[in-house]
């Protein structure tokens, strides 16, 4: 038990003191999720009963000061074992709901989970989002078993999503993470992960808990830290990910800034790791992969192209100090094209992203300005991608994304060469 | 008799004043010498200060910080190509040189210069604050121009460039008005000019929005009245 722990209160310490040790820990970070967290807690308990009834397990709800009674819902939620055809319920199951300390954010909630996992010497851990609607007991099996029985340290989620869902992940985060660190983890910012107690303890040694990682960059940080430090990683197929509707007014540029900034910050920290040569390799995938029927979604391509054109016209003065002349010329040419012939080629897009990474690395201007000015170009790439794949099936879109990933890998030497050069 | 008269005249008109002049010159010479020595010492100390400040600024990564907040870019725009650490070093050099020049002038003990310096020294803080106001106004204007431009483009506003430039000009004009107010130059004129300018900008913007935005307003009203909606988007970016 870490007596000197800054973030575990005396009350929490007393709560976990009696447990001494656990085999499995499942963490659920939350903030005003009373509507959905009951289902998540029941799914976790059912999963533990169904697949890990011989183990000692604990569910930790790390809450950010909810005012809608989230923690009460967690305490009251229980599963009807008969209805899920489980004879033997997990004997040694404990549940605690505690408010986390530190700066507000998912990262601080995770830190509490890591602290408790380390204090209880947990062998395998998992964290799942509290707004999930599609979580089933099998998710717990898939996230925990690779750690407990196969010796993996990190289990990334692998979901089936609509072909136009997760466009930041698809066009930037997945391909760049794969190109840089060499592991094909399809959902590096998925939100639901499994990890070993050893990795939880390693995460705690990192001095990031007062930074943006504690606020919003924890997902990509966990994945990159595990991969860059050579922990044994795999992914688990969880089916479809359906969660509570997100705030429709959420600012895209702020979201893009947070995610891409986290990726670029990690590039600074792990420069020696990503500069190593070699092609990317796939990671073992657990679970039975099946096709998922997903509801069609509406896409306003005209609006995206309009914003791209406006961005190229008005922000050229900024782009001049970020991307080289020939790329800017290409952007201007693309901006003149009609919707039918609108296309932003992969190679150009990859170089744009690499030049934005270089601009942040050289600090040519405020990072927030650099990355928020990427929004129109990102919308241009998404529009180009949607136009190209409108008639394609999800499988064909996946193959198309593979081509984009290969472009990121092919252009990696271009980035490496310029990383050390001065502006 | 004539010789004696001539000698007296020479004494009164020529030798006396000359003697007096040389006596004063001899009395003044030590002051002049100290003044020159103090000034040269000031130049030397300024040079040392410059070197130290540049080293400290580089150790503190001042150049990176300035580039990050957009100061380097702003300096570049006004033709200052030196990096910020060198610029800071130079600033301190001139500060030390000016201080020692003032001390050197005081040492001369010339009443007219003393009087002039006293008035200058009393006015000096106003100049310093005015210069600072203009620099801060310029840098803030540049920074907010860029922030406004990016935010407006991301919001899809067609007149983003105009809006951003408007923000920059407004902030800079405001800073200049505050600086002139600090210097006490035409206080009333500045206030009146600023009021006219500000009203003019608001009027011009109203006109520009009125004329340029009539189609947008028409579309908006049509949408409102007829219930026409822009095509929705369900894309989850994350």
Image (cartoon, helix red, strand yellow):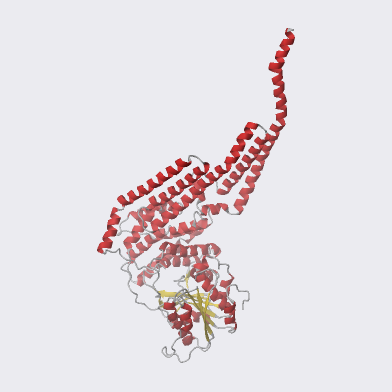
Q: Is residue A314 above or below residue B110?
A: below
Taking depth in this image into account, of A190 and B96 the one nearest to the observer is B96
Q: Quadrant of the N terminus of chain A?
A: bottom right
Farthest left residue in view: B226
Residue A287 appears in the rendering: no
Taking depth in this image into account, of A292 and A219 the one nearest to the observer is A219
Residue A327 appears in the rendering: yes
Q: Position of residue A171 (x, y in %)?
A: 41, 65
Taking depth in this image into account, of A109 and B16 the one nearest to the observer is B16
Q: Is residue B40 above or below residue A219?
A: above
Q: What residue do we see at 48% from left, 39% from top?
A: B186
Q: Position of residue A238 (x, y in %)?
A: 43, 78
Farthest front residue in view: B188
Q: Is residue A210 above or below residue B35?
A: below
Q: Position of residue B3 (x, y in %)?
A: 74, 9
Q: What residue do we see at 62% from left, 45% from top?
A: B50
Q: Is residue A184 left or right of residue B32?
A: left
Farthest top residue in view: B1
Q: Is residue A392 left or right of residue A149?
A: left
- Counting every numbered tag in the picture gives 0
Farthest bottom residue in view: A87
Q: Is residue B124 left or right of residue B211?
A: right
Q: Is residue B86 above or below residue A40?
A: above
Q: Position of residue A100 (x, y in %)?
A: 53, 74
């Amino acid at each position: 038990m870490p007596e000197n722990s800054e973030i575990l209160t005396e009350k929490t310490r007393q709560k976990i003191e009696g447990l001494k040790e656990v085999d499995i820990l499942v963490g659920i970070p939350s903030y005003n999720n009373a509507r959905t967290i009951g289902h998540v807690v029941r799914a976790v308990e059912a999963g533990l009963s169904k697949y890990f009834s011989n183990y000692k397990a604990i569910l930790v709800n790390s809450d950010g000061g909810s005012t809608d009674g989230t923690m009460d819902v967690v305490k009251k939620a229980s599963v009807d074992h008969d209805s899920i055809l489980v004879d033997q319920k997990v004997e040694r199951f404990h549940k605690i709901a505690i408010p986390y300390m530190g700066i507000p954010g998912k990262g601080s909630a995770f830190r509490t989970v890591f602290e408790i996992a380390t204090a209880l010497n947990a062998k395998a851990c998992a964290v799942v989002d509290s707004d999930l609607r599609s979580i089933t007991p099998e998710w717990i099996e898939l996230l925990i078993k690779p750690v407990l029985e196969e010796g993996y340290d990190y289990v990334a989620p692998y979901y089936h999503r609509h072909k136009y869902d997760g466009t930041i992940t698809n066009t930037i985060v997945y391909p760049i993470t794969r190109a840089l660190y060499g592991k094909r983890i399809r959902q590096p910012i998925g939100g639901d992960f499994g990890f070993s107690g050893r990795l939880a303890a390693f995460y705690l040694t990192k001095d990031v808990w007062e930074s943006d990682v504690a606020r919003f960059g924890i997902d990509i940080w966990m994945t990159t830290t595990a991969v860059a430090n050579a922990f044994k990683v795999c992914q688990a197929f969880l089916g479809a990910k359906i969660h509570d509707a997100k705030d429709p007014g959420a600012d895209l540029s702020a979201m893009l800034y947070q995610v891409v900034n986290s990726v670029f910050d990690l590039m600074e920290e792990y420069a020696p790791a990503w500069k190593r040569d070699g092609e990317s390799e796939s990671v073992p995938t657990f679970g039975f992969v099946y096709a998922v029927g997903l509801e069609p979604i509406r896409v306003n391509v005209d609006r995206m192209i309009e914003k791209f054109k406006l961005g190229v016209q008005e922000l050229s003065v900024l782009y001049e100090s970020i991307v080289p002349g020939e790329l800017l010329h290409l952007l201007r040419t693309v901006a003149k094209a009609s919707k039918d012939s609108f296309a932003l080629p992969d190679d150009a897009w990859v170089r744009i992203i690499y030049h934005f990474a270089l601009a942040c690395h050289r600090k040519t201007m405020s990072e927030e300005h650099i990355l928020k000015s990427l929004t129109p170009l990102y919308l241009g790439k998404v529009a180009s991608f949607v136009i190209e794949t409108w008639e394609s099936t999800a499988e064909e879109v996946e193959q198309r994304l593979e081509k984009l990933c290969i472009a990121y890998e092919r252009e990696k030497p271009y980035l490496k060469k310029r990383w050390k050069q001065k502006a | 008799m004539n010789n004696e008269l001539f000698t007296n005249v020479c004494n009164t008109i020529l030798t006396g004043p000359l003697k007096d002049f040389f006596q004063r010159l001899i009395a003044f010479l030590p002051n002049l010498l100290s003044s020159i020595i103090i000034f040269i010492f000031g130049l030397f100390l300024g040079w040392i200060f410059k070197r130290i400040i540049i080293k400290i600024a580089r150790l503190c990564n001042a150049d990176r910080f300035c580039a990050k907040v957009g100061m380097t870019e702003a300096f570049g725009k006004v033709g200052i190509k030196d990096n910020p650490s060198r610029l800071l070093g130079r600033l301190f050099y001139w500060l030390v040189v000016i201080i020692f020049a003032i001390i050197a002038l005081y040492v001369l003990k010339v009443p007219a210069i003393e009087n002039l310096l006293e008035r200058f020294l009393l006015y000096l803080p106003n100049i310093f604050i005015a210069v600072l106001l203009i620099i801060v106004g310029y840098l803030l204007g540049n920074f907010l121009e860029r922030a406004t431009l990016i935010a407006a483009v991301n919001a899809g506003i067609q007149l983003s460039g105009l809006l951003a430039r408007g923000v920059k000009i407004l902030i800079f004009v405001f800073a200049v008005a505050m600086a002139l107010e600090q210097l006490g130059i035409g206080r009333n004129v500045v206030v009146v000019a600023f009021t006219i300018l500000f009203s003019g900008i608001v009027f011009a913007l109203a006109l520009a929005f009125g004329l340029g935005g009539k189609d947008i307003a028409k579309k908006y009203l049509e949408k409102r009245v007829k219930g026409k909606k822009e095509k929705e988007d369900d894309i989850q970016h994350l």
